[in-house]
Image (cartoon, helix red, strand yellow):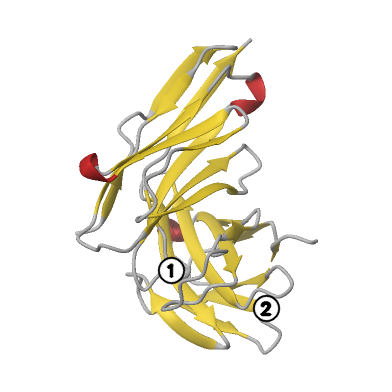
Amino acid sequence: KAGVTQTPRYLIKTRGQQVTLSCSPISGHRSVSWYQQTPGQGLQFLFEYFSETQRNKGNFPGRFSGRQFSNSRSEMNVSTLELGDSALYLCASSLVASGRVVEDGELFFGEGSRLTVL
Amino acid sequence: AQKVTQAQTEISVVEKEDVTLDCVYETRDTTYYLFWYKQPPSGELVFLIRRNSFDEQNEISGRYSWNFQKSTSSFNFTITASQVVDSAVYFCALNPPPQGGKLIFGQGTELSVKP
C-alpha cells in the first residue's frame, strides 16, 4: 500500500513569507503527527492531529499551526518565516491517537519537505 | 523529565563487523514505548521496531537484534555482519503516555559501513 506522502519535497522561501506543507497519511490511518528536523535541535515534535482535532502539541511558537481534513490529510503552516525555520519537516501517520494504546501503533514517516528560508 | 540519549554521534566500521548502537532513556512513566528508526540520505525515517515497556524480551530480526533492559533504561540495537547498505543515521525514540504520535528522539547515531 502507498506510504505517507508529503508535498512539496523542496521549497525556498524568504523571511517574512508563509508556507503550507501537505501530508497524506497511509490509507486507514487517522493520526498524523508533524516533526521538525534541524542539525542543531534534531527531531522535534510539532503537533498531532486525530479526527480533525489537535490532540498533542510540542513546544513551538504560535507561528506554527496545522489542521486535518475529514479524509485525514493534514497541512501545517508556518507564518512570518524566520531563517531558523529552515529544516526538514516530517509527517508521520499511525492508527493510534493519543490516549489509545494498541499493538499496531507504529508510526510511519514520509520523506519530508525540505524548507529553506533565505 | 523525559529524555533519550544516544551517546555515540558517529560510528565507523568495516563491512561484516558487528556494531551496537546505544540508547539510554529517562522517564518516570511506567507505561511507554520505545522505537528505533533508520534515516538513509533520502530523509525518510524507516521504522525498525516498537517495544512495549512491559516486554523485556530481546528481539531478533535477521541481522538486527535489540536488547531492552529496563533496569538500566537502555534499549540497544545491534547489527550483525554489517553491510554497506546499513550506512545511515539511526534514531532511538521514546513514546510516552498518552502514546499516539509524539516521539521524543535521541540525537541519532551516524553509522558508516565501509567496504
At label 1, the amino acid type is Leu
At label 2, the amino acid type is Arg
Which quarter of the rendered picture does the N terminus of chain A lie within?
A: bottom right
> In the picture, residue A19 is in which quadrant?
bottom right
Image location of residue A38, percent across then percent down: 44, 49
Q: Which residue is mark 2?
A: A73
Chain of the residue under label 2 = A
Q: What secondary structure is marked by label 1? A: strand
Q: Is residue A61 left or right of residue A69?
A: left
Chain of the residue under label 1 = A
Q: What secondary structure is marked by label 2? A: loop
In this rendering, does residue A114 appear at all? yes
Q: Residues within 10 Å of mark 2 (few under 14, many from 20)?
A: many
Residue at 58% x, 19% y: name it: B82
> In the picture, residue B1 is in which quadrant?
bottom left
Q: Is residue A27 left or right of residue B49?
A: right
In this rendering, does residue A79 appear at all? no
As displayed, is residue B71 above or below residue B20? below
As displayed, is residue A82 above or below residue A78? above
Q: Residues within 10 Å of mark 1 (few under 14, many from 20)?
A: many
Residue closest to the eye, B90 or B63: B63
Image location of residue B51, percent across then percent down: 45, 52
Q: Which residue is mark 1?
A: A46
> In the picture, residue B75 is in which quadrant?
top left
Q: Earlier in the sequence, mark 2 or mark 1?
A: 1
Q: Is residue B5 left or right of residue B16?
A: left
